[in-house]
Amino acid sequence: MIVLRKAPSETLRAAIVLDGRSLRRIAAKAELPASTISRFINRRRGLSHRAFDRLAGVVGFELRPAARST
């Protein structure tokens, strides 16, 4: 599990890079063009909500609330 205190998009980028599968394989599983993912990883473009959700599901990325200190 990757736990970073950064923007969700940065954490998703890290999850994609660290996944171990090729960009093409991830793209195929997410039903997205590999070029879309490449541009996202290289910070040339953002992702739609739909694309973000699909990629997150493929690489096992989950958003959870941070633990609150009391």
Image (cartoon, grey):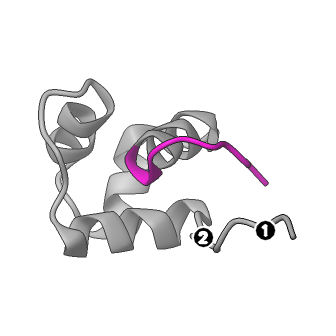
Q: Residue furthest right?
A: 70
Q: Residue at x 62, y 66 (%)?
A: 60
Q: Residue at x 53, y 34 (%)?
A: 17
Helix, strand or loop under label 1: loop
Q: Is residue 2 magenta?
A: yes
Looking at the picture, tell me which residue is in the foreground, 26 or 42. 42
Camera-side mark, 1 or 2: 1
Looking at the picture, tell me which residue is in the foreground, 21 or 10. 10
Q: Position of residue 39 (x, y in %)?
A: 18, 33
Q: Position of residue 27 (x, y in %)?
A: 33, 55
The first of marks 1 and 2 along the sequence is: 2
Side of 23 relative to 48 (left or right):
right
Q: Position of residue 33 (x, y in %)?
A: 17, 53
Q: Which residue is the site of mark 2?
A: 62
Q: Position of residue 32 (x, y in %)?
A: 21, 61
Binning the other alpha carbons within 10 Å of mark 1 as few (below 14), some (14 to 19) or many (20 upward) gives few
When asked about the image quadrant of residue 41, the answer is top left
Relative height, residue 50 to residue 26 (above, below): below
Side of 43 relative to 9 (left or right):
left
